[in-house]
Image: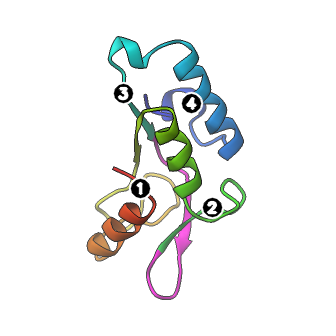
């Protein structure tokens, strides 16, 4: 599953949890769909130390960890979009020159 096809950038964490619940309610995992991916428009910037953070309006914790924990609690894999350039397709920062830092942040957030 990829959020872009249903909600594009019009979402918050509560709506995303609802889509996870619906995904499970429709029994899609039993049909082989085991991954739930958050697409673009989730990030808001980088802290001074370069660490990426989630849009606080959409994710009050400024991380994706609570959503990742929720997705995992449903028995699904969780992924999140980034870009190898300087910015994502939307206004969020890409991973260029921050690849290792973003990988560590994603690992901390239990993405992947």
Task: Give the SS element for disc 1.
Answer: loop
From the image, which quarter does the N terminus lie in?
top left
Q: Quadrant of residue 105?
A: bottom left
The residue at 66%/64% (across/down) is 61
Contact between marks 4 and 1 (CB within 8 A): the answer is no
Q: Nearer the viewer, mark 2 or mark 4?
A: 4
Asked which secondary structure carries label 2, the reply is: loop
**Image coordinates for residue 94, horizontal then vertical, percent:** 38, 64
Q: Is residue 20 above or below residue 49?
A: above
Q: Is residue 85 above or below residue 12?
A: below
Looking at marks 2 and 4 on the same chain, the residue that comes earlier in the sequence is marked by 4
State how far apart marks 2 and 4 are (Cα). 19 Å
The image quarter in which residue 12 lies: top right
Label 3 – label 4 distance at C-alpha: 11 Å
Query: For mark 4, what is the residue?
Result: 20
Say the numbered circle drawn on residue 34: 3
Q: Counting residues from the N terminus, which is met first, the one under dot 3 or under dot 2?
A: 3
Q: Which residue is mark 2?
A: 55
Q: Which mark is residue 110?
A: 1
Q: Pick whichever, 112 or 5, lies toward us.
A: 112
The mark closer to the camera, 3 or 2, is: 3
């Amino acid at each position: 599953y990829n959020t872009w096809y249903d909600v594009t950038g019009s979402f918050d964490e509560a709506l995303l949890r609802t889509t996870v619940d619906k995904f499970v309610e429709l029994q899609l995992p039993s049909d082989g769909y085991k991954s739930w991916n958050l697409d673009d428009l989730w990030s808001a910037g980088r802290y001074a130390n370069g660490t990426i953070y989630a849009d606080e309006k959409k994710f009050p914790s400024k991380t994706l960890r609570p959503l990742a924990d929720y997705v995992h609690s449903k028995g699904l894999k969780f992924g999140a979009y980034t870009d190898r350039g300087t910015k994502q397709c939307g206004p969020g920062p890409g991973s260029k020159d921050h690849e290792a830092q973003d990988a560590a942040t994603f690992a901390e957030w239990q993405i992947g």
